[in-house]
Image (cartoon, helix red, strand yellow):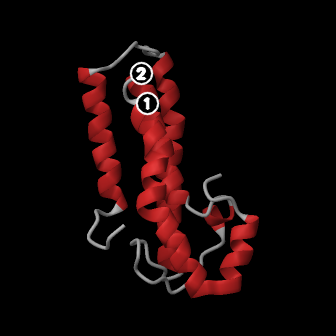
Amino acid sequence: MSRSAPLPPAILAAGLVLMAALHVVVPGPQLLHLPASLVGLPPLSAGIGLNVAADALLKRHRATVKPFDESAALVTSGVYRLSRHPMYLGFVLLVLGVALLLGSLGPFIVVVALPFVLEALYVRAEEAMLAVRFGEEWAAYRARVQQWI
């Protein structure tokens, strides 16, 4: 990814807009109806919570939240003990929650595609930068913590 690419929240916003468009234009079968579609609230809430928690930890450690900016610290505590990319995992949970709330099949295209987009645009490059910046500390962290979950 070039440094001029959109920031991850812009990708999330585009995904949400695409989900709404798919729900309206090509919804496919309606899989869930109210109240069953409310099953989307827990993953939506978890996604938001993961992002808030990860952002707070990064700020506390003075580590950058922006892709491709050099990080001052390798954060391995809190939600970073569960996932090397809790913010991206949060994005995926958030769109899963929205897809469930919408209830139609069409928006699930974004749920499936988003992790691959995030991997291609950000994760590979970020992990390469962290390997260079933090060396053995990164290698040990990477060996014990899953990339997503």
54 over 75 or under it: above or below: above
Query: For the point 57% across and 84% down, which residue is it?
Result: 132
Q: Is residue 130 left or right of residue 21?
A: right
Q: Is residue 143 left or right of residue 25?
A: right
Front-lying residue, 5 or 80: 5
Residue on which disc 2 sits: 105
Amino acid tagged 1: Phe
Res. 4 image quadrant = bottom left
Helix, strand or loop at mark 2: loop
130 over 8 or under it: above or below: below
Disc 2 and disc 1 in contact, CB within 8 angstroms: yes
Front-lying residue, 46 or 132: 132
Residue 39 in sight in this render: yes
Amino acid tagged 2: Leu
- Distance from disc 2 to disc 1, alpha carbons, whole Å, reads 6 Å
Q: Is residue 44 left or right of residue 82?
A: left
Name the quadrant of the N terminus: bottom left
Question: Which numbered circle lies on residue 136?
Answer: none
Q: In x, y percent, where is residue 57?
A: 54, 71
Q: Is residue 14 left or right of residue 135?
A: left
Query: For the point 71% across and 84% down, which residue is it?
Result: 136
Residue on which disc 1 sits: 108
23 over 89 or under it: above or below: above
Q: In x, y percent, where is residue 107?
A: 38, 29
Q: In x, y percent, where is residue 108?
A: 43, 30
Res. 138 image quadrant = bottom right
Q: In x, y percent, where is residue 114?
A: 43, 45
Check disc 2: other Cα within 10 Å, few if <14, some if 14-19, many if 20+: some
Helix, strand or loop at mark 1: helix
